[in-house]
Image (spheres, rainbow, N blue to C red):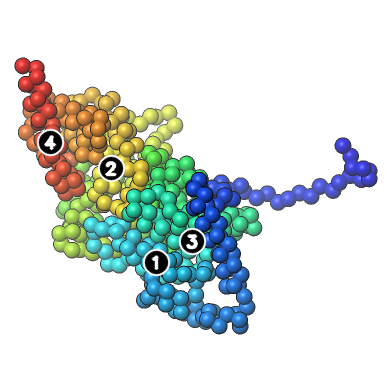
C-alpha cells in the first residue's frame, strides 16, 4: 500500500555485513536458577557503573597510571593475585581482588598444569608480551578470566559457576557489539577472546556452543584474510605473538578430539624446528624405519604413517624430557602437539573425492589421538572425556578382519581401548584382546603389541593399568575354559 501523502518512500541500501554466528548473550545466563540470574544482573549493573567511572577524564582519575607508564610497563605484576597490583597496572575493567585471583589461576596454576608431566624453559602465558596482550583489552581480559573460572569450576567438579556465567556473558556481549560496529576490522583481541570462549565450551562439554564459536572464529579469520594460515607475509607478526595462534589451535583441536569432529581452522607451521631435534639422527632414522615396516604391512595410508612417525618422535622426546631433564621450548612443543593432532583429525579431508577411509586407518587415527591425550595428562580434562573416540575406535576395530601381519597394531589399539573404557565397552575390548591372545598364543601384552609398543610404549603412558588389563584378559580366558569344560 502506498503512503497516505502519495510520495514514494526513499529506499537506502545498507552496506553488506557478514553475519557471524555466536551465542546470544541477551539473557543473563543459561542457568535457570533465579538466584544466580539475579546475582549476574547485579554484577552487570556494577560493571556498567564501573565502566562509566573508568571512562572519566584522566585529570579526575588520579589513581590511574598515565599512558606513558602503560606503554613501558609490560612486565607481569609481581603481586599478581593481590589487590595491591591495582596500583602497579591499569586494567580496562574494575579489577577487584576476586578478579585478580582468577587471573592468577589462569596465568599461573592452570597453565602450569596444562602439561604437568613435562619440563619447560618458561610459560608462554607468563611472558610480558602475552600478559600485555591478555589484559589491555576488555573482551580479551573477560575471556582470560572466564578461562580461569572454568579451571576452578572443573576442580570443584562443576560445569557452571557465577564467575563462568558472568565473564562468558560479558565477553560475548563485547564481541557482539564490535561485530555490529565493524564488518571487517577485527583485531587480535577479538580472535583471542573467541578462542577462550570456544576452549571453555569444549572442556565443559558444551558441543553445540563449541561449534558456534569455532564457526564464528573461522568466519572472522577468513574475513580478515591476514593470518598466517592464509597469508605467509604476516607470519613475522605471529612470531612476535605465537601464543595467540596456539590458543586458536588449542580451542579448535581440543573440541574436535572430544567430539570426533573435523577441525575448523587450517594449520600452517611457523617454526621450522621440532622438539625431537634433541634426538640423535640415528635414533630418528631407526624410529622412522621401524614405523614404516610395521604400518606398510598393515596397509596404512602413507600420510598417516608420516604422522604416526612424528608421534613416535614426540613420545621419545617426552621420555628424554622426563628422564634427562631436557627442557622444551613451550611454543615449539605446543605447535608439534597440535600439528600432529590436527593431521590425525583432518586426514579424511585430504582424500580424493571418491575415496573412502579404510577401517584400519580410522582405528589407528582414533587410537593415536587417545594415546596422545593420555600421554600428556593435559588439564583441565574435558567433561566429555574419551567416550566418543572410544566408540569410534570400537566400531572401526569390529569391521577389521584379523590377520597375523596386523596383530601388533590391532593389539596395541585394543589395549588402549580396554584401559580407557568402562562397563560394556571395556568388556568388548577385553574380549577382543582375548581373541588375539588365543590366536597368537602370546603370554604378555608386550608380546602381543610387539613393535608398536616399543615405538609408542603403553607402560610409559598407562603405568600399571597395562598389567591389570592383561590379568583381566587372562582371568576371563581361564574362566571361559572352566565353563566350557
Q: CA distance from mark 1 to mark 3?
A: 13 Å
Q: Is residue 49 above or below residue 16?
A: below
- Asked whether the residues under the numbered discs 1 and 4 touch, taking CB atoms below 8 Å apart as contact, a structural biologist would say no
Q: Which residue is mark 3?
A: 142
Q: Which is in the foreground here, disc 4 or disc 2? A: 4
Residue 160 at x, y = what percent?
Answer: 42, 50
Residue drawn at point x = 44 percent, y = 42 percent: 207
- Assess disc 3: are there few (<14), some (14-19) or many (≥20) residues with their C-alpha within 10 Å of its C-alpha: many
Report the residue that reaches farthest toward the right: 5
Q: Which residue is mark 2?
A: 370
Q: Nearer the viewer, residue 32 or 246?
A: 32
Q: Which is in the foreground here, disc 1 or disc 4? A: 1
Which is nearer the N-term, disc 3 or disc 4? 3
- Assess disc 2: are there few (<14), some (14-19) or many (≥20) residues with their C-alpha within 10 Å of its C-alpha: many
Q: Which residue is mark 1?
A: 101
Q: CA distance from mark 1 to mark 4?
A: 45 Å
Report the residue that reaches farthest toward the front: 35
Q: Is residue 214 left or right of residue 342?
A: right
Split into 4 quadrants, where in the image is the N terminus? top right
Q: CA distance from mark 2 to mark 3?
A: 32 Å
Q: Is residue 221 above or below residue 243?
A: above
Q: Nearer the viewer, residue 430 or 355?
A: 430
Residue 118 at x, y = what percent?
Answer: 24, 59
Q: Nearer the viewer, residue 164 or 230?
A: 164
Q: Which residue is mark 4?
A: 470
Instruction: Identify the disc placed on residue 307.
Output: none
Residue drawn at point x = 18 percent, y = 27 percent: 431
Residue drawn at point x = 56 percent, y = 69 percent: 50
Amino acid at each position: 500500500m502506498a503512503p497516505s501523502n502519495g510520495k514514494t518512500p526513499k529506499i537506502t541500501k545498507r552496506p553488506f555485513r557478514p553475519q557471524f554466528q555466536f551465542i546470544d548473550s541477551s539473557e543473563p545466563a543459561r542457568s535457570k536458577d533465579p538466584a544466580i540470574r539475579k546475582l549476574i544482573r547485579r554484577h552487570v549493573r556494577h560493571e556498567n557503573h564501573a565502566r562509566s567511572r573508568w571512562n572519566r577524564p584522566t585529570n579526575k582519575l588520579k589513581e590511574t597510571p598515565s599512558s606513558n607508564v602503560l606503554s613501558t610497563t609490560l612486565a607481569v605484576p609481581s603481586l599478581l593475585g593481590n589487590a595491591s597490583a591495582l596500583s602497579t597496572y591499569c586494567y580496562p575493567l574494575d579489577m577487584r581482588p576476586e578478579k585478580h585471583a582468577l587471573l592468577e589461576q589462569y596465568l599461573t596454576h592452570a597453565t602450569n598444569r596444562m602439561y604437568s608431566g613435562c619440563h619447560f624453559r618458561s610459560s608462554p602465558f607468563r611472558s610480558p608480551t602475552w600478559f600485555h596482550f591478555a589484559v589491555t583489552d576488555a573482551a580479551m581480559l573477560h575471556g582470560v578470566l572466564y578461562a580461569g573460572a572454568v579451571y576452578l569450576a572443573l576442580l570443584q567438579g562443576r560445569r557452571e559457576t557465577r564467575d563462568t556465567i558472568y565473564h562468558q556473558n560479558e565477553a560475548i556481549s563485547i564481541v557482539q557489539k564490535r561485530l555490529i560496529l565493524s564488518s571487517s576490522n577485527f583485531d587480535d583481541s577479538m580472535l583471542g577472546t573467541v578462542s577462550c570462549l570456544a576452549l571453555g565450551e569444549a572442556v565443559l562439554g558444551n558441543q553445540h556452543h563449541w561449534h558456534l564459536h569455532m564457526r564464528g572464529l573461522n568466519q572472522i579469520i577468513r574475513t580478515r584474510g591476514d593470518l598466517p594460515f592464509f597469508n605467509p607475509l604476516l607470519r613475522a607478526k605471529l612470531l612476535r605473538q605465537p601464543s595467540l595462534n596456539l590458543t586458536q589451535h588449542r580451542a579448535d583441536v581440543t573440541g574436535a578430539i572430544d567430539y570426533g569432529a573435523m577441525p575448523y581452522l587450517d594449520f600452517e607451521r611457523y617454526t621450522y624446528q621440532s622438539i625431537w631435534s634433541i634426538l640423535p639422527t640415528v635414533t630418528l632414522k631407526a624410529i622412522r624405519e621401524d614405523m614404516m615396516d610395521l604400518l606398510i604391512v598393515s596397509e596404512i595410508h602413507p600420510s598417516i604413517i608420516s604422522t604416526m612417525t612424528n608421534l613416535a618422535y614426540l613420545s621419545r622426546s617426552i621420555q628424554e624430557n622426563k628422564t634427562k631433564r631436557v627442557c622444551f621450548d613451550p611454543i615449539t612443543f605446543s605447535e608439534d602437539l597440535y600439528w600432529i593432532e590436527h593431521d590425525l583429525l583432518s586426514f579424511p579431508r585430504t582424500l580424493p573425492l571418491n575415496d573412502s577411509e579404510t577401517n584400519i586407518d580410522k582405528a589407528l587415527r582414533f587410537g593415536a589421538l587417545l594415546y596422545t591425550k593420555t600421554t600428556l595428562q593435559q588439564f583441565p580434562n574435558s567433561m566429555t572425556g574419551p567416550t566418543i573416540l572410544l566408540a569410534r575406535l570400537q566400531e572401526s576395530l569390529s569391521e577389521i578382519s584379523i590377520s597375523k601381519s596386523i596383530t601388533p597394531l590391532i593389539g596395541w589399539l585394543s589395549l588402549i581401548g580396554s584401559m580407557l573404557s568402562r562397563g560394556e565397552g571395556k568388556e568388548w575390548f577385553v574380549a577382543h584382546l582375548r581373541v588375539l591372545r588365543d590366536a597368537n598364543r602370546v603370554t604378555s601384552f608386550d608380546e602381543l603389541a610387539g613393535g608398536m609398543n616399543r615405538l609408542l610404549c603403553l607402560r610409559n603412558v598407562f603405568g600399571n593399568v597395562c598389567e591389570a588389563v592383561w590379568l583381566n584378559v587372562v582371568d576371563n580366558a581361564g574362566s571361559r575354559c572352566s565353563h566350557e569344560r
